[in-house]
Image (cartoon, rainbow, N blue to C red):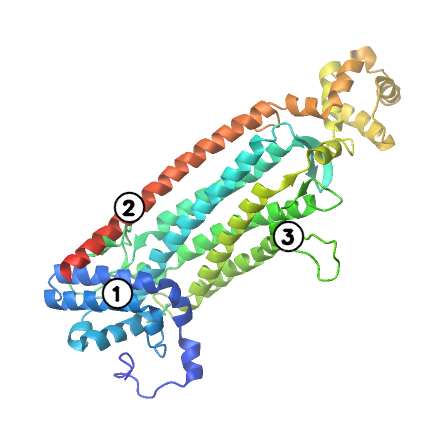
Amino acid sequence: MNILRRGRLSAGQDEDIMNFTSSMEADTRIFEADIEVDRAHVVMLKEQGIIKNSDCSAILKGLEKIKNEGIGKLDTSYEDVHIALEARLIELVGEDTGGRMHSGRSRNDEVATCIRFTLRDELINIMAEIHDLVNTLAKTASKHHETLMPGFTHTQHAQPTTLAHHLLAHANAFLRDLGRIKGAYGRTNLNPLGAAAFASTGFPINRKRTTELLGFDSQLGNSMDAVSTRDFMIESLACYANLMTDLSRLAEELILWSSSEFGFIELDDSYTSTSSIMPQKKNPDMAELMRGKTGTVHGALVSVLTICKALPYSYNRDLQEATPHLWRATDTARSCVRMAEGMVRTAKIKKDRMKKASTVGFTTATELADTIVRETGIPFRTAHHIVGYVAKTGDMPALSDLDRLSLEIIGIKLSEKGLSEKSIINALDPMDNIKKRHITGGTAPEETKRQVTVINKELSSSKNELRKIRLNIEKASGKLEKTCQQYS
Ligand code: ARG
């Protein structure tokens, strides 16, 4: 007999309807969290004198057995893990005891608590993966402060840069992703338990106690908000979406760079596939999948936003439909960060190809125009005009070429205004370009070295923070475990 439907509802449901209604599949993600939430709730009920010591002890023992049996032992004809678990408990310890666990609680606050409890671990995990990725980018950059390459705008050769400068650009983006996830973590690790269906409860429960036992930073302050909102999910998904956009841009570059046209890198074999027909092929499939999975994660964000849009308060079953998107996006984003880290770490860098390409397309033209301005005092726009004219001919200009053109354009030779052959040679040297750009954020090796130092500092303080967060959770879980042992 279904313990939930037996009172109000009569007819059983056929399988098709049951499958439509059930969240059992996605609930595998929160099974363990549900046991922890149950344990904390039961401990608190006993301490508040809401249930007897003997009932608490029997329920805790029952929960222990259910935990060991695993979710597979639960009756899947129930619509979700919460009620299936309660049914199993009642089967084990009898209704007079097991039937008391759900006092002062609803599945509405229960499920919100379970999702937050599980998601916070996932956020910690993905933050740790981002640490690894940023670390690998910074480490690789450290070996390439002087590795010349062309920088691009519009996918056209633009100005020379270094591989360090380019990789650190990505590292900075991922550090911001990390910061956003940290913010999401703070708004996720809050306790909804005690909100019950939405109106809280008349039982004298102690929300502070479950907050403490479950390792939440604090409790949500309005019971209707607590069960109604999935904004913490949306926020995490938005963080993932941003992260995936950043990852897709890295993926795209790894794909381009490993093409014959670029030939800047060769990806490690393990991150590539071959063709079933073309025996010579080495394809960057992992990077392509990363690019593709971006769509999966963006889709998840849009799905959850749309599911929550215009939902009247408080709980509605629509919310159940949101959760699987969260887990799918979480797993996808996390695996992509890991793949990106491995691809960057193991890629072979073809320095010579990069260096050769660094001046193709007259990438030093900007520095030449800047040099003319500095040496002769003519306006930048005029220098831009003269150098642009030179670029059209495609040849690297000598002083005589520039003189001829400037005479034509502004009626005076640049050499007469102080431009020297030597300054032109310097301006056309890509390494000279790189070294001149030593202001904050620039390409100069001394500057990219400074950037690596800053990133490493941020990384180590972020790792410290994460260690503290983990410690807090471990402490709470140790306390809950100890209390359960004591009470059972
Ligand atoms: N499986 C449900 C969910 O994921 C749990 C809450 C069900 N509550 C209810 N009133 N039907 O949202």
| Residue located at (29% from left, 51% from top) | 216
Of the image marks 3 and 1, the number of the one nearer the N terminus: 1
| Residue located at (55% from left, 38% from top) | 137
What amino acid is found at the position of numbered circle 3 in the picture? Thr
Q: What residue does disc 1 label? A: 196
Q: Is mark 2 within 8 Å of ligand 1?
A: no
Spatial separation of the CA atoms under disc 3 and disc 2: 40 Å
Q: What residue does disc 2 label? A: 472
Residue 166 in view here:
yes
**In the current view of this chain or complex, which residue is farthest to the bottom?**
11
The crowd level at tag 3 (other Cα within 10 Å; few <14, some 14-19, many 20+) is some
Q: Is residue 396 above or below residue 15?
A: above
Of the image marks 2 and 1, the number of the one nearer the N terminus: 1
The kind of secondary structure element at disc 2 is helix
The crowd level at tag 1 (other Cα within 10 Å; few <14, some 14-19, many 20+) is many
Q: What residue does disc 3 label? A: 272
